[in-house]
Image (spheres, rainbow, N blue to C red):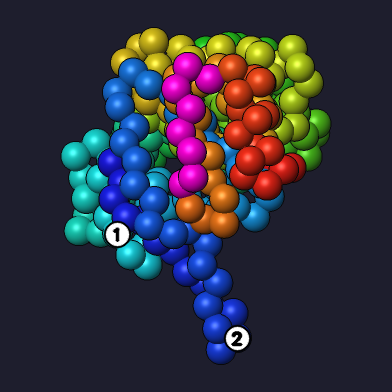
């Protein structure tokens, strides 16, 4: 999926290296969690792998498409039809209801006939059926996060890129969101999840540990204890 991915950002006359030569493969039917200390490059790596940031070096293939050689229109169609996104900042449109926010990717992908039914079903799955007609400002942070989960699930994606999907949720709702993401995997899709939560990361099939933008450790058959130990070796707090 990714080979020698690197990303730098300008900082005055210098450059900040956010990701350093990271290679990884996300297999179909697999959930992979990415953990690491704050500032280790987790969210930047996810954005590079999802095609939301251009690469400085390396290459990324998503569902058989080399992102560097895929045109903007084709890339947009690929995302709308096959990829689900869960953003830490929610990225909801303030003027639209929860229902309309969830419907939007389906409508943009030309799946208008199924949009309302799928959006309603997805909102019900995340426990927000009764809030479907509310706008983001009328929802709590945790409810807004669940709308983003529903939006990702509604397209029945082949791959989900999730940035802190349980960050604003209580323990019970977090467990439900992780169960829903696992459902994507059980249906044959894939999930790449950035998280600060060691227990949440331990629900993945593999855990990748970043430090200073580099992949420093991979944990197969993770447990919460093994993830916490790896984070300690990587430099502490997430």
Is 25 above or below relative to 9? above
- Which residue lies under the disc numbered 1? 58
Q: Which residue occupies the foreground of this view, 144 or 4?
A: 4
Q: Which residue is painted at 40% across and 61% down in the image? A: 6
Q: Which residue occupies the foreground of this view, 52 or 136?
A: 52
Q: Quadrant of residue 36?
A: top right
- Is 48 covered by the magenta stretch? no
In the figure, is residue 122 to the left or right of 157?
A: right
Q: Residue 106's spot in the image, x, y percent?
A: 40, 31
Tell me if residue 195 can be seen.
Answer: no
Specify few, some or many for label 2: CA neighbours under 10 Å numbering under 14, 14-19, or 20 or more.
Answer: few
Q: Which residue occupies the foreground of this view, 104 or 162?
A: 162
Q: Quadrant of residue 201?
A: top right
Is 75 above or below relative to 223? below
- Which residue lies under the disc numbered 2? 12
In the figure, is residue 71 to the left or right of 81?
A: left
Secondary structure, mark 1, is: strand
Q: Residue 155's spot in the image, x, y percent?
A: 40, 26
Magenta-drawn segment: 215-222
């Amino acid at each position: 999926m990714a080979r020698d991915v690197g990303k730098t950002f300008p900082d005055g006359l210098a450059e900040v290296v956010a990701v350093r030569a990271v290679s990884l493969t996300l297999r179909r039917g697999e959930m992979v969690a990415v953990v690491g200390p704050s500032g280790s490059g987790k969210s930047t790596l996810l954005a590079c792998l999802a095609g939301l940031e251009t690469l400085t070096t390396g290459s990324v293939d998503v569902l058989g498409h080399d992102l560097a050689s895929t045109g903007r229109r084709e890339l947009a169609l690929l995302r709308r039809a096959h990829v689900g996104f869960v953003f830490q900042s929610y990225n909801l449109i303030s003027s639209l209801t929860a229902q309309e926010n969830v419907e939007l990717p389906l409508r943009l992908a030309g799946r208008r006939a199924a949009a309302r039914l799928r959006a309603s079903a997805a909102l019900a799955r995340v426990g927000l059926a009764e809030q479907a007609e509310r706008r983001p400002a009328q929802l709590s942070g945790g409810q807004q996060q669940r709308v983003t989960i529903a939006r990702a699930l509604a397209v029945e994606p082949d791959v989900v890129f999730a940035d802190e999907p349980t960050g604003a949720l209580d323990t019970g709702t977090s467990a439900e969101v992780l169960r829903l993401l696992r459902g994507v995997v059980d249906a044959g899709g894939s999930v790449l999840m950035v998280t600060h939560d060691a227990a949440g990361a331990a629900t993945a099939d593999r855990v990748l540990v970043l430090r200073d933008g580099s992949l420093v450790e991979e944990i197969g058959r993770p447990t919460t204890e093994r993830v916490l130990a790896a984070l300690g070796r990587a430099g502490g707090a997430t």
